[in-house]
Amino acid sequence: MKFRTEVDIQKSEKKIEVEDSLFSIGSCFAAEMSDLLMQGQLQSFNNPFGTIFNPFSINNAVKRLHDADSYEEDDLIAFNDEFISLDHHSSFDTRYVHQTLNKINAELEKGNSFLQTTNWVIITYGTSFIYEFLPKGKLVANCHKIPQKFFEKRLLSHQELTDSIYNTILNLKDICKDDVQILFTVSPVRHTKDGMIENQLSKSKLIMAVHEVLSDMENCHYLPIYEMMMDDLRDYRFYKEDMIHPNAQAVNYIFEKFGEAYFSAETKDFIKENFKIYKALEHRTTDEKSPKYIEFREKLNQKIEAQQKKVKHRIFTTDD
């Protein structure tokens, strides 16, 4: 007897190997998936523009990364004693123009370099809604809590959506390796502030546009992440307290399904062992000179060394 309807991800003929690089861009769900890839010690780079949601802004970001088109002072605005890029998440905002530009351009340079060698790109769209900053007549990625009177909100048209997705693919295929695989997802996070009906319309437009563009594209795939959350995991026990964002159990389940479809056997084993090591590294003690703790760390270091021998890139660095 079945008590739920499962949504499976179609198994990929091309697998993600332990030495592959993965670039991700888009919504906050993209960041959660990227975090798991990094915990698994795969080479991963996420959101050089910070969290962004709509296809137009994501295409703009990919174009800037492709062109290595650095930002200058004229690209910023000043608000509330901070210098801001409307193309970026608010995490880039600072009180000094040179600091904002340095943060933005450092990530842009790293993103451009990473894309040139990446094997996989994961794009997660969150919404079809976009805001126009009226003083500049500019479509923006983030409003940075600037008063609403300075913006006009609207849905991107179907043509704008498909053009943005198509141009994103063209730029990625140009800068990345010849056989780069591009995976598209729609975020399962509901944008309830738009309204429940409006959110469903927004997500539907995204799904329709992605499927239309991908029907004529090679090495481009759709991952039914939104469908998994809405159907397979349609229970509020899989959500955080805000009843909007998937909780850790849901994210891990989706990641596992993704891995079953896309990871090679070697990659699955590599990530599984690294997850155990990562969890063990979180262990803290009040007595680092305790013989038991010293023995624990020595065994852990031996496991890390064994894992390191399987790959050329550095794993479990201090950044992890």
Image (spheres, rainbow, N blue to C red):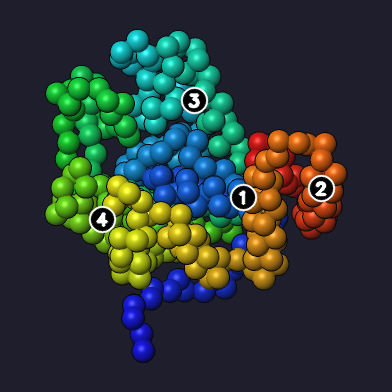
**Residue type at mark 3?**
Ile
- Which dot marks residue 203? 4
**Residue at 50%, 52% in the rendered image:** 33
Label 4 neighbour load within 10 Å: few <14, some 14-19, many 20+: many
**Mark 3 to mark 4 CA distance (whole Å):** 29 Å
Q: With respect to residue 109, does 222 lie above or below?
A: below
Q: Which residue is mark 3?
A: 104
Query: Disc 3 or disc 2, which is closer to the eye?
Result: 2
Q: Which residue is mark 2?
A: 292
Label 1 neighbour load within 10 Å: few <14, some 14-19, many 20+: many
- Which dot marks residue 301? none
Could you tell me which secondary element the residue under label 4 belongs to? helix
- Of callouts 3 and 2, the N-terminal one: 3
Q: With respect to residue 73, does 43 lie above or below?
A: below
Residue 141 seen from this side: yes
**Mark 1 to mark 3 CA distance (whole Å):** 25 Å
- Of callouts 3 and 4, the N-terminal one: 3
- Of callouts 1 and 2, the N-terminal one: 1
Q: With respect to residue 221, does 24 lie above or below?
A: above
Could you tell me which secondary element the residue under label 3 belongs to? helix
**Residue type at mark 1?**
Gln
Could you tell me which secondary element the residue under label 1 belongs to? helix
**Mark 4 to mark 1 CA distance (whole Å):** 29 Å
In the depicted view, which residue is nearer to us: 313 or 220? 313
Residue 74 seen from this side: no
**Mark 1 to mark 2 CA distance (whole Å):** 25 Å
Q: Which residue is mark 1?
A: 39
**Residue at 29%, 52% in the rendered image:** 243
How many tags in the picture?
4
**Residue type at mark 4?**
Lys
